[in-house]
Amino acid sequence: MKLICSFFTLLVILSAQTMVVRVYGKWSDLARISPKYHLDIATGRANEWYDIVVDRNTMDRIIASGLPYEVQVYSLELEKEKVRGQYYSYDQYVQMMRQLAQTYPSICKFDSLPVRTYEGRWIYGLKISDNPAYEDPTEPGFLVDGCHHAREWATPYVVYKFCDSILKVYSTNNEIRQIVDNIEIYAFPVINVDGYVYDYPAQRSWRKDREPFGGAIGTDPNRNYGGCSGDVAGDWGAVDENQASHYPSDQTFCGPYVNSGDETRALAMYVRDHIINAYMTYHSYGELFLWPWGWTGNGTPDSIVYSRWGVRIAGMINKLGGGSYTPGQSYLNPYPTSGGSDDWLYSWCHWVGGIAALAYCTEVGTAFYQSTSDLDNIFQQNFKALKYLAQLCRDSIPPLCEGCVPPPVIYPIGNVPQNFTIRWHPVNPTENHPTQWELVELSNPSVIEDNLESGTGRWVLQGFTLST
């Protein structure tokens, strides 16, 4: 059992601006600190311990809770000072990606997501393929991204180095050449561009984007995606088990509506316009390897495949202190979440796009502001996992994880006589292989109006009104 430290240590704790404190106990025990889980949780081991980013007020509540704890980082500000200016800025990443596209134009194209961020920046990335100017419908797609959370500085480095490494060895390494020649790779090192620019190099320990709402700044991009599973508990804004927050000042604020953040809207638009069969999103920290669902302990339709490959891939990634990354469904590895990019991408591909797809998340390293001396080791270990997932994307995911046949796109017909013709086209038929269609004709609809709710006592309207 962990005990509170000496009086001197306690004074240091209480005087520090921001700390990282490891609290021991079950997930439900954290309600003793904050009944609604209004906590900035960095990582954890399910029902064993959780690392919480705390200020003076939260530290007081941890002490009052009676839960055992120990301080992991006495001053996050001092830890950040150790790596100030040693990482790349967003402008430097952009320039380096431009240089890669110029150096390897036959297999690399400078790319961007389709809309700007709230502060007017483009989210830039690279497409790597044997014909990067052409979207080949016969080749699987592999999407890799980093830095949904601004303070997770190691993640853009992993994504960028993946691109840099495969481009450099393409002409000499047959294994890499086979990957590049047979799949389309899309890589975006920094999704939360505004947040990253705000946090680096000023080191504000910022997590969210920078769009204001409800008197606060920022939405957590990785709580802002929707869900397409058909279960409302898996859609945007689900908080039944404290998977996210509806309080704008909280670190896990899910936004005022689904894809309210320009970052999440941009990535979702990009995914809908491409065939994505494999997805890897990088976060930090915790040395974990995760897969959907985050919002429930129930498995996905491809849960057996997720688990089999997830355990295998996690075993390829060595921790900095020895051993391999901890694999598991993210609902309990380490705690429930909703609105994550991996949950959304998998559910959209499976049920809406009709695309065979798997989506994974890797929590790299042991700190938000990882020592730069660790970065090459972190990348080298994760490169093996990325290469393996790319090979699965090429060979195994399409035949094993076929998506549902989505409703076809029916062309508008307007007003029609008694006999009329319906025309449609299937959605991604090479991905879900439809064999037959059922036509249902509906007529004489009955429209019912229902009051939303009497009174406004449970609502903060902010200019909106209740209606039928």
Image (spheres, rainbow, N blue to C red):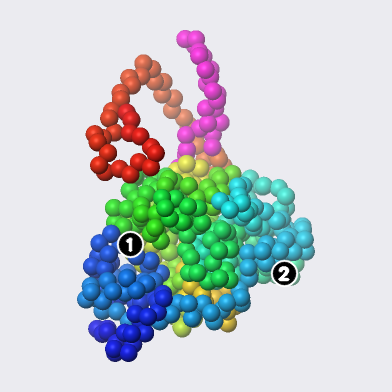
Q: Is residue 124 at least partly visible in the picture?
A: yes
Earlier sequence position, callout 2 versus callout 1: 1
Residue type (three-letter) at the residue carrying disc 1: His
The residue at the point 62 percent across, 54 percent down is: 121
The reply to whether the magenta stretch includes residue 423 is yes
Q: From the top left corner, tell me how far across and down residue 95 is, in percent.
A: 71, 64
Residue 464 placed where, x, y %? 38, 37
Residue at 54 percent of width and 81 percent of height: 82
Instruction: Rate crowding at label 2 as few (under 14), some (14 to 19) or many (20 or more) other CA atoms within 10 Å.
Output: some
Residue 11 part of the magenta segment: no
Q: Amino acid at mark 2?
A: Lys
Residue farthest top in this picture: 418
Work out whether residue 301 or residue 104 is closer to the camera in this orientation and state it: 104
> In the picture, residue 74 is in which quadrant?
bottom left
Q: Nearer the viewer, mark 2 or mark 1?
A: 1
* Direction from residue 417 to residue 85 in the image, left or right: right
Say above or below: 286 vs 352. Answer: below
Left/right of residue 410 with respect to residue 34 in the rendered view: right
Magenta-tinted stretch: 404-427
Q: Are marks 2 and 1 in contact (CB under 8 Å)?
A: no
> Which label is found at residue 468?
none
**Res. 226 visible in picture:** no
* Disc sitting over residue 38 in the figure: 1
Q: Is residue 79 left or right of residue 129?
A: left
Q: Quadrant of the C terminus?
A: top left
**Residue 411 lies in quadrant:** top right
Q: Which residue is mark 2?
A: 168
Q: Position of residue 363 (x, y in %)?
A: 47, 68
- Vertical comparison of 61 with 9: above or below: above
Q: Please rate how many residues cluster around mark 1, counting C-alpha atoms within 10 Å: few if below 14, some from 14 to 19, many from 20.
A: many
